[in-house]
């Protein structure tokens, strides 16, 4: 009987060390709201016919609102990435406010370019609501043919190991 | 478990929302132009020397003529004429005459053979010239002795400087 | 005890397989729309074209002006610039325009302008260029006589 219990503990312990992380992730949630629609036309030419198109555009500072729901005292980090971007464009993102709530938040105040892989945007503790996000699109030029493009931005919240 | 999910819009399409325009964009300029009065006449060169033969005994030598030269004309004006006169030369009309006949350009009139005055006065050789440009129009000279003056007839040669002028009628 | 052991083992496998579900995600759409942009501009008006010289026997010498230029921006492909005047030229005269080609485009050279659009530059795609020379040539036959006038020239950037 003792032998069986010992074996059980040896198998379970390493896994028990990780279970609490999985259990906390279940209570860690992110939601986003808002949108940004950008229209580019001849009014964005630098100086009329013959001139270049304005290459950089910024959204309102609160184009997106992020809510983080987390357990008390839990630490988390928000990661962000984009789906494929056409035509030599770059999209940047930054946090423009701390939002509200009892928790804390840091990082992400400067624009960072988004890639197809995840990049950490900001981190914090406890819950935060209405964290505002601003976007910036760079590289717009006359070589991009007319049309509507939709860019997908994906946010993920993870427990922060720091 | 309540999950917060945004609605995923997978519009990877690139839609043309406006037809590529036949309307296009346009710009304008004002272009001013003018044609001013132009009057140009030129000749192809000097005629060949006209040699007066001895003629029949007791009779004046016959008239000689020369038609190797031409003239060119351009005018944007109306009702012009060409006159002729001698410069730096003259002749005694009791002794001889020098005539000239100019082929008229389109729409103009030539009186035919016109005696070039022996002094420096002018004579009309073509009239009614309006808005024309033509080249290679014929010039015919005619020369003849009209009086018998043995002394003057012995003069070796005559040189005449003939001046054509395109001028107002 | 044996039952407890089995339950614990089964429970562990459930959590291990769930390890793949890391974090929570949300998605945001950023939309941007680029409309068709077709812009052409000119630098001003040329000087007066005056015909006032000729060689005798020939039509008067044409007058030219190359002091103005055009600028063009388009995000379209295979566009063209056409030109026309607002009314016919006086008899025995003609007004021609030659536009310098854009990069990758083709100029038609001197083109006599009339009341219908004429192709001046073709094959214009995805560019913005400025300072492209416009050269006018006004010619008159002697039969035109003395005259003066003006015309409004309209350049249009349109589909090729």
Image (cartoon, coloured by chain):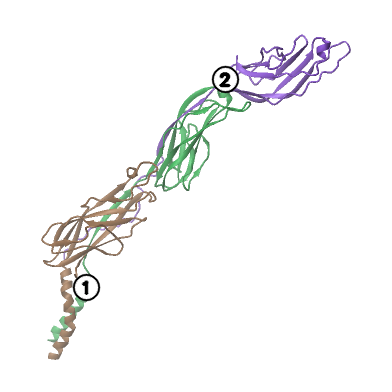
Chain colours: A brown, B purple, C green
Give me the chain letter of mark 2.
Answer: B
| Quadrant (top left/top right/bottom left/bottom right) for the N terminus of chain C | bottom left
Residue B130, percent from left and from top? 60, 19
Secondary structure of the residue carrying tag 1 is helix
Residue C35 or residue A45, whichever sits in front: A45
Secondary structure of the residue carrying tag 2 is loop
- Left or right? Give the position of B127 relative to C122: right
- Left or right? Give the position of C5 relative to B149: left
| Occupied quadrant, residue C24 | bottom left
B152 shown above or below A110: above
Residue A132, percent from left and from top? 19, 55
Q: Is residue A9 visible?
A: yes
Give me the chain letter of mark 1.
Answer: C
* Residue at point 79%, 10% (across, down): B146
Residue A33, percent from left and from top? 20, 55
Reading the image, the residue beneath label 2 is: B77
| Occupied quadrant, residue A93 | bottom left
Reading the image, the residue beneath label 1 is: C18
Q: Nearer the viewer, mark 1 or mark 2?
A: 2
Q: Mark 2 Cα within 10 Å, few/some/many (few <14, many 20+)?
A: many
* Residue at point 18%, 79% (across, down): A15
* Residue at point 55%, 22% (across, down): B37
């Amino acid at each position: 009987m003792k032998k069986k219990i010992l074996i059980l503990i040896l198998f379970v312990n390493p896994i028990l060390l990780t279970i609490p992380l999985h259990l906390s992730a279940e209570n860690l949630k992110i939601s986003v709201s808002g949108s940004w629609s950008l229209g580019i036309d001849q009014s964005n030419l630098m100086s009329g016919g013959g001139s270049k198109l304005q290459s950089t555009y910024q959204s309102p500072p609160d184009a997106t609102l992020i809510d983080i729901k987390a357990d008390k005292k839990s630490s988390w980090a928000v990661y962000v990435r984009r789906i494929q971007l056409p035509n030599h464009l770059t999209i940047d993102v930054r946090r423009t406010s701390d939002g509200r709530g009892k928790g804390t938040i840091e990082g992400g105040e400067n624009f960072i370019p988004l890639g197809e892989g995840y990049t950490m945007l900001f981190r914090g503790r406890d819950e935060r609501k209405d964290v505002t996000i601003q976007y910036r699109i760079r590289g717009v030029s006359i070589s991009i043919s007319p049309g509507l493009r939709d860019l997908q931005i994906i946010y993920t919240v993870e427990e922060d190991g720091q | 478990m309540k999950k917060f999910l945004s609605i995923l819009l997978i519009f990877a399409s690139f839609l043309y929302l406006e037809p590529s325009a036949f309307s296009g964009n346009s710009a304008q300029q004002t272009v001013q132009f003018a044609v001013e009065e132009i009057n140009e006449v030129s000749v192809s060169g000097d005629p060949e020397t006209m040699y007066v033969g001895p003629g029949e005994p007791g009779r004046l030598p016959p008239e000689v003529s020369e038609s190797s030269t031409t003239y060119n004309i351009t005018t944007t004006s109306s009702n012009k004429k060409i006159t002729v006169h001698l410069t730096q030369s003259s002749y005694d009309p009791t002794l001889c005459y020098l005539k000239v006949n100019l082929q008229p350009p389109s729409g103009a009139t030539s009186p035919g053979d016109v005696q070039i005055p022996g002094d420096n006065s002018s004579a009309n050789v073509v009239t009614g010239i309006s808005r024309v440009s033509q080249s290679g129009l014929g010039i015919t000279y005619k020369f003849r002795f009209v009086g018998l003056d043995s002394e003057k007839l012995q003069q070796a040669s005559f040189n005449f400087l003939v001046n054509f002028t395109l001028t107002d009628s | 005890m044996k039952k407890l052991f089995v339950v614990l083992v089964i429970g562990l496998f459930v959590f291990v397989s769930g390890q793949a579900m890391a974090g929570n995600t949300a998605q945001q759409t950023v939309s941007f729309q680029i409309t068709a942009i077709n812009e052409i501009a000119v630098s001003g008006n040329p000087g007066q074209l005056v015909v006032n010289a000729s060689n005798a026997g020939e039509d008067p010498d044409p007058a030219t002006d190359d002091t103005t230029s055009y600028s063009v921006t388009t995000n379209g492909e295979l566009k063209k610039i056409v030109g026309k005047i607002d009314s016919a030229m006086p008899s025995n005269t003609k007004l021609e325009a030659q536009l310098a080609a854009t990069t990758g485009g083709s100029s038609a050279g001197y083109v006599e302008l009339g009341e219908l659009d004429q192709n001046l530059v073709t094959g214009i795609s995805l560019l913005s260029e400025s300072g492209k020379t416009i050269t006018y040539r006004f010619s008159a036959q002697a039969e035109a006589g003395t005259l003066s006038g003006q015309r409004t020239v309209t350049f249009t950037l349109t589909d090729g």
